[in-house]
Image (tube, coloured by chain):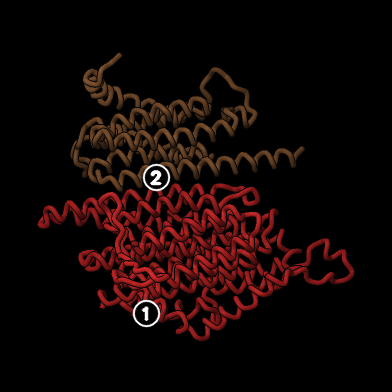
Chain colours: A red, B brown
Amino acid sequence: MSLPLLLMALPMVTAVLTYNLRRWLWFQVLLAVGTAMALIVLVQVSPVDQMVVVAGRDVLLRSSWEVLGRSFTFVSSDRPLLTFLFSAALLFFLAAGAARAPALFLPVGLGLLLLMEATVFVQPFVYAALFLELIAAVAAFMLADRVYARTDGALRYLVFVSLGVPFILLAGWQLEVHQVSPDDALPLARATWMLAVGFMIILAVAPFHSWVAMVARHSPPLAAGFVLTVVQAVVAFFLMDTLAQFDWLRANANFFLALRLGGMAMAAFGAVFAFGQRSLGGLMGYSVLIDWGATLLAIGLGTPESIAVAAMLIVVRVLALVVWGVGAGVLVGPFGDDYENMRGRARNHPFAMVAVFAGGLSLSAMPLMAGFPGRWALFSMLSGAHTGYAIGLLIAGTSSWLGYARALCIILRRSESQDEQSYYAGAEEDPLTIVFAVPGVLLLLWVGLAPQLLSRMAQRIVENLAQLLA
Amino acid sequence: MLATTDMIPLLAYWAGTPAVAAVFVTAAILVIAEDLRVLVFALAAQYLFVGLLYTHVLAPQVAGIKITSGLIVWLIVFFSAHQHGWRPASAISGAPARWVLPVRARFRVCAVILATLIGWKLATPGVLPFPVASEHVTLGALQLICQGLLLLGLTSRPLKTGLGILTFLSGFGLLYSGVEPALMVVGVLAAVDVAVALAISYLAAVHVSSGSVAESARR
């Protein structure tokens, strides 16, 4: 049996099962969480290309699965990345119960897990781009439904990924041309700009960023969080893998400059629009844009430390958006997530509101929150040679903080119906929301105070690239 | 009845200039037309002739995979349009249908002509770094890419946006199959087409249901 096949088949089978269980949310949650845990255990303990005894039978877990002349290959250095992906998915699946996620969230989430594994395993690795296109198509099923019926975000996401993927595939072809005639530098130059353009489009670098805010505003909160953190993390690690594979790309200063400028453009656009938002989803979308801009800036610095910081930012973002998603899933109803619509609901759901603001402020790198240590480390790196970037990022972060402060002021104002009431009716909070929101917020604070809890995991994910850059 | 030996030269003829001409026309119709009946018919014709163009760059058996996937995609779009109600956009928005070209259509005709010229210019040898497997393929593929991009820029409705993505991907698939004819890549590209068709069909259904909910709420 091949380990990649086993790892990809498991979520596919359980995706079908969870789809059939969509009337029973908690059965779905149990099955999805169990699958994610089983995958984590398999990735951590499975010996590769060795005979093991399972239920009295000798089983050989091969590292590779050949399909039509290409292969899906598991290498030991993939273990930390896969563990992160499965853990992130586990947190989102667990949160789906508290946030009352749409019925398709879990089956589609499991399906996406299978495709994300395929992007990690496929060889030659540039074919991962094809699976990114499949991911965008499958994600559409969780990004819109009868309640969240605006389809603009899902469509725009699909369009931009469709535009970006051809560049990466054609870059792979140019690399093959270079292998045939190694003295010709033109294919390498073409491959470099094709990779840069392809990644810029898929990573939502401005001006290709519009889908981020649309998805954040119009899609179910947890589904939006899943796509903006876990799926986009796969793209970022694909970029890092590309850097690790090609020494000529690592030696290209212009490529790193493009990443830094792209990151700064994301942060600048986020800064301009975050403060003026009038909906929770929009504010989250532009805050995520700023955070992704910081991540690209860190990758663009091209040092082992900055790559570790980029990985840390990606890992912490998952925590922030899970907590945000639990709160927003409760607060945001069929009336939308405009601040005015939230006014009455926020006072009735104080724990959900605290979860939304704690997650959002962590995303904005507020001091004491989980997002701060990574951003602070990045500021320290930028303060020497790239002071302009540091100031720009600081302004972007401030815009996001002010956006949340403004949102809090509007949401906490009493609604007209509450003004007419002469007594306080009390909170209507579901105990389940409290069970998820309180530990989530405490975890964000704890990671903010003790970032080493996650930084080691983040370092292990990018160990290969960090060693090559050293 | 035609024997296989008679069919081969016939196929070779239809996979040449007629296929490119058909691709030009069908891609233009996809951009300009609003009536779903016309759009679905144009998509079917486009996939048929793109399938014929694939015979220039892939073995006929492998090109068969693309034709089959095209058929599946067309069926998905057909049923989605059927569910949508076959009405042109003007009927849905309440505007009266007239026998003169509305301003929007006239603008689209001009844009299509411009996109055609751009695609034609890009197909000149040496402009783009592609090995020329066949001039017909390059010309047809670049037309599909340009018209697909134009369609993506001009519409925001799920079904038409989806047709834009599918047209763009058809063009890219033709070009890419010339440089990477591996069976797995052809298969995954076919799977991508089907997944995109399913996604836009789902989004179109959600879009329509939200419209009907809003309509019943207004009543």
**In the image as oriented, which residue stretches furthest toward the front?**
A56
- Residue B36 placement (x, y as % from top left): 52, 28
Label 2's element?
helix
How far, Cα to Cα, is label 1 from label 2?
A: 44 Å
Identify the chain of the residue marked 2, using the numbered disc in the image.
B
- Along the line of sight, which residue is nearer the eye, A41 or B218? A41
Do the residues marked 1 and 2 share a common chain?
no
Residue at image x 57%, y 62%? Answer: A222
Q: What residue does disc 2 label? A: B191
Identify the chain of the residue marked 1, using the numbered disc in the image.
A
Q: What amino acid type should be assigned to the residue bearing mark 2?
A: Ala
Q: Is residue B93 above or below residue A60?
A: above
Q: Is residue A119 left or right of residue B54?
A: right
Residue at image x 59%, y 52%? Answer: A20
Q: Which mark is residue A381?
A: 1
**In the image as oriented, which residue stretches furthest toward the top?**
B1
- Residue A248 placement (x, y as % from top left): 20, 65
Residue at image x 26%, y 23%? Answer: B11
Q: Is residue A280 left or right of residue B37?
A: right
- Residue B94 placement (x, y as % from top left): 65, 29
Query: Total number of numbered labels?
Result: 2
- Residue A233 placement (x, y as % from top left): 43, 65
Q: What amino acid type should be assigned to the residue bearing mark 1?
A: Met
Q: Examine the rendering and report whether any part of residue A257 can be seen.
A: no
Q: Examine the rendering and report whether any part of residue B97 can be seen.
A: yes
Nearer to us of marks 1 and 2 is 2
Quadrant of the drawing holding the C terminus of chain A: bottom left
Q: Which mark is residue A227?
A: none
